Image: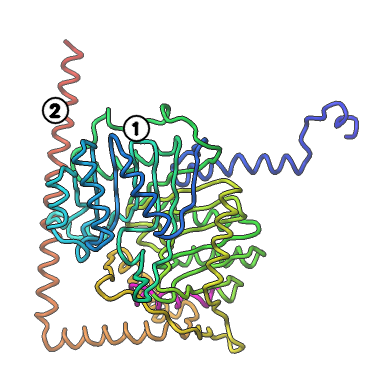
Amino acid sequence: MLAVKQIHPNIPRPKQLRQRLFRIPAGQAFARTVGAPLVAGNQVRLLKDARENYPAWLEAIRSAEHAIHFESYIIHEDDQGQIFAEALIEKARAGAKVRLIYDWVGGLTATSNKFWRALKAAGVEVRCFNPPRFDSPLSWLGRDHRKLLTVDGRIGFVAGLCVGQMWVGEPEKGIEAWRDTGVEIIGPAVAHLEQAFAQTWAETGELLSANELIVTSPIPHAGDTSLRVVASVPNTAGIYRLDQMIAASAKETLWLTDAYFAGTSPYVQSLRAAAKDGVDVRLLVPQATDLPVMRAISRSGYRPLLEAGVRVYEWNGPMIHAKTAVADGRWARVGSSNLNLASWITNWELDVIVEDTGFGEQMEQMFLDDLANSTEILLTAKRKIAKPKRPRPRRLRAKFDTISSGRTAAGAVRIGHAVTAAIANRRLLSPAEARIMFSAGLLLLLFSVVAVFWPRWISIPLAVFAAWLAISLFIKAVQLHREGKREESALREITDSNLE
């Protein structure tokens, strides 16, 4: 073997060979899992909170010459919403193509029709994602939860932030801003952001014309950072599989920040397995939240994590809304996907996966800075979860609270899992789940009482919903049948023309 090494110095040593063989399949596995290629040559800037994100967004909007594509789950009709509306209106009147997508559920209580009419009157093309439809009774479960901005195909932003005063806070009243994270991207990856927007735009109406789509090749390299743009759509579960893959492949650290944590059993098990194998796994979640039920749901999942060695922290500020992950200081995720089934399965989400040690180190430092304003959750000697002792901070008034079908669905799934576990006695339940058990029992008891004494109150709504669902299925069947006929007709015409 010594002679071989001297004659062929370029033959990799066993350790180098193992590393090289691992690196190639890992890249292929990531690409296949999320369906997103690794795009090189980008400049990526990490943006913290609204104080860094909003000014960067507005500067890009005001510099636009040709096109602005803005996609946001919620745009609140408040001071911040008006600032962005005025910036978009100004560019639309100046001749730029301004296109905006908002989610119907997200805007339901946050924005009035008057707000959207003002934008449309100024020339902004506004589309609402997935409003209620008679032919699809359950379509409301899938929401456009993305937060995306691109300008002239040269600069793009992906974030966890929507547009609203809660992200800025009210310092004069002692109300802190929400904590959140975003990224600015310049380079070839902006084309993939444009394609993600075009994908959602097509779901809301007519497609963008071919000459308006940005392709990858004309965009020059702007840096040396490689990343993947993951545009998730319902029922693909790409990010879900990727999150588990990263948990399985992390060697030293896996640090997660999530706003609405309701991990499934397989994902929780992947975190537990990593922690038991010596990986430093940490999870940072809110203590105060805009959806109070999520706090009980998240806490109900602490115990199995803590028992396996996962360190759990709660943010001491009014709300931490970021959705980020960093593993081994070289792989990082920033975007809109939360660690729950709504984001993994039912929503349209957008995340950026950055594979760069410099960016990874920035993410690690940001996470450590956040821990300085957090309280660690510990198991007591009796294996109970010690509640945080720090006082809860003031939060924004109730009018700034939002409604999310996605978060509600994720919470319902979590509650369902807990109730099923209690009934089937499949796993050990924690004391944190006592409130869930009591509430579920109370609701079931109330349902049974109503069913006995007022059966029509149960049977009539169920009958109406069943009829609605049946009619929607008939409509879908007719639409599919007509589509099949059109395809047959088109195929017949092509065949006839070829024979001629």
Disc on the earlier residue, 1 or 2? 1
Amino acid type shown at disc 2: Ser
Single out the residue that lies furthest toward the top.
500
| Whole-percent x, y for residue 489 in the image | 14, 28
Numbered disc 1: secondary structure: loop
Amino acid type shown at disc 1: Ile
Q: Are marks 1 and 2 in contact (CB under 8 Å)?
A: no
Q: Is residue 8 magenta?
A: no
Q: Name the residue beneath numbered marker 1.
A: 214
Quarter-of-image position of residue 288:
bottom left
Q: Nearer the viewer, mark 1 or mark 2?
A: 1
Image: 4 above or below 295: above
Give me the disc on residue 231: none
Give me the disc on residue 489: 2
Predominant secondary structure in magenta? helix
Decide which of 333, 262 is in the foreground and name it: 333
| Whole-percent x, y for residue 223 in the image | 53, 37
* Quadrant where the image shows the N terminus: top right
- Residue depicted at x 17% and y 56%: 131
Single out the residue that lies furthest toward the front.
172
* Type of colouring: rainbow
| Whole-percent x, y for residue 122 in the image | 15, 45
Q: Which residues are magenta?
A: 289-305
| Whole-percent x, y for residue 377 in the image | 54, 78
What is the C-alpha distance between the residues marked 1 and 2? 34 Å
For disc 1, the neighbor class at 10 Å (few under 14, some 14 to 19, many from 20) is many
Q: Is residue 483 left or right of residue 230?
A: left
- Residue depicted at x 58% and y 72%: 311
Decide which of 270, 102 is in the foreground and name it: 102
